[in-house]
Amino acid sequence: LRNFNKKPDRKPAADTNPSSSASSEGSKSQSALSSSNVSSGPDSPASGTLPEPFYPVSLGDAASDLPVVLGKIPENLGVPAIPAVGAPEAIDTQDKGTPDKWVPRDPRMVRLTGKHPFNAEAKLSDLYSQGFFTSTNLFFVRNHGAVPEVDIEKAKNWQVEINGLCNNPVSFSVDDLRRTFEVITIPITLVCAGNRRKEQNVVQKSLGFSWGAAGISTALFTGVRLADVLNFVHPQKGAKHVVFEGADDLPNGHYGTSQLASWARDRKRGMLLAWAMNGKALEPDHGFPLRLVVPGQIGGRSVKWLTKIELSSIESQHHLHFHDNKVLPMPVGPDQARAETQWWYDPRYIIRDLNVNSAIATPDHDQVLAATSDSEEATFVLQGYAYAGGGRRVCRVEITLDEGTSWSLAEIKYPEDLFREVTHDDPVYGRIDLTEEDTCFCWCFWSYAVKVADLSKASSIAVRAMDESLALQPRDMYWNATGMMNNWWFRVVIHHLD
Ligand code: MTE
């Protein structure tokens, strides 16, 4: 970036797109800004026509029998549009020779754990320029192992067994779910508990790999309410937990985790058994043909390739339920955590809801800005995202240019609220209706116009958000062995080049 008038290199995807060009003229001195969310990757995709949906094999005549969503997002609803770039269509050459050699992926995804398993995020600027919804090909992916290979025949016969402490155990195909329960569509932001871990790994290497700040994405998910399905099986007294298992077979058994039954049975918590994302069948990387989606909680609870749901008196006993998604106390280092296993089994250290968090997307890492003295009033628009957990709303975002001595309020936009003004019903999406809901399941976008004159005197920019429970992002990092839930102020350092 050479001056403040740089235009975004692609068209905004929707009116609600958080990107906007910065203002101001002239150049006198330059400032380079670097943040800890370093990621590399090619330029943003060019917007174009919506590609055909991808399926692992050609659907042909089978399409009409399948519980997949075929069609466009309803138009004229007044809700944010899904970016024109849809699902990945080609095999990335990097996957050759791996168990995922058949999985289509977008080569612009930044791989964080080498070739395999696939763990990837988009460049933060690419993600942010998409706006409220993330196209499926740039949606972050967290896979602990190989993607289960599911073709159309397998998808048709896919069963999710629901049993354990209930009076009416049952096994449902995806189509059974669709025919038996009300189908709904809601926007949901998923966030990996490791989002922003890279900053923690700089302080001391944790057990986890380095996510930047793009371990977060938003999609429109279609499915049935978990609460309705659980009511159908008549849980018994004593069923305190609901345990979920996925088909992926990992070195220590299947991926699995659990929810408190009282939460899982609460319709307001919005948990879905979903088969579609952004109006199309789930991609293999995102759980085709069926996954759990848990809004407001860490992404690890949203079990992909879902095969089992068990009502139980005890929480999940799956290996990763304990050895993942925990925030151990700060003094416990990675070696101690590995050696002394009791830490993992202490129920106090479980993570459920996301914590309040925010990040700066504009200016981008290594962006070079030309400062100006032409006008005292010239401004540059700082921008980014914020989110909170448990359905809570972010109510405040604040910016400091002096390391927290003084703070200014940023403006916040909540594109999710547009969904509270519409209702829609059709055979594909089922019911879209958030008119009675006030829980927040999605990210929001903040912006703050800072005077260029002030920016050229500052040595850093930092942002912090507060949610409606008044939880506030802390000044200091809570470093922990798994490197999870990092939510200290997000800082961008300014280097003055002359
Ligand atoms: N489900 C299964 N079966 N296997 C997995 O490896 N990863 C979890 C969760 N569900 C995982 C899973 C984690 S840690 C996250 S953050 C989310 O999936 C990521 O969902 P996504 O890859 O669709 O973005």
Image (cartoon, rainbow, N blue to C red):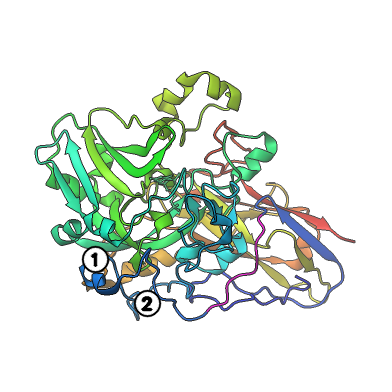
Q: Is residue 430 left or right of residue 327?
A: left
Image height check: is 209 above or below 440?
above
Q: Position of residue 432 (x, y in %)?
A: 27, 67
Is 402 placed left or right of 219 in the picture?
right
Q: Is residue 103 above or below residue 254?
A: below
**Lower position in the chain sequence, tag 2 or tag 1:** 1
Residue at the location (18% across, 51% down)?
172
Residue 91: numbered disc? none
Q: Is residue 333 visible?
A: no
Q: Residues in magenta?
A: 39-47
Residue at 23% in and 59% down: 156
> Which quadrant is home to the C terminus?
bottom right
Q: Secondary structure at mark 1?
A: loop
| Residue corresponding to mark 2 | 78
Residue at (42, 30) in percent of width and height: 322
Look at the image and say whether residue 237 sits in the magenta stretch: no
Give coordinates of residue 435: x percent, y percent.
28, 65
Which residue appears farthest toward the right when viewing the image?
A: 498
* Residue at which label 1 appears: 66
Along the line of sight, which residue is nearer the eye, 45 or 489?
Answer: 45
> Horizontal and vertical percent for residue 299?
43, 47
> Looking at mark 1, is its residue's CB closer than 8 Å to ligand 1?
no
Q: Is residue 492 visible?
A: yes
Q: Amino acid at mark 2?
A: Gly
- Residue nearest the viewer, comparing 477 with 237: 237
Above or below, 28 relative to 169: below
Q: Residue at x 32, y 59 (%)?
A: 151
User: Which amino acid, by three-letter code, is at mark 1?
Assistant: Leu
Name which quarter of the figure residue 257 lies in.
top left
Say what secondary structure mark 2 lies in: loop
Q: Residues within 10 Å of mark 1 (few under 14, many from 20)?
A: some
Does 42 lie within the magenta span? Answer: yes
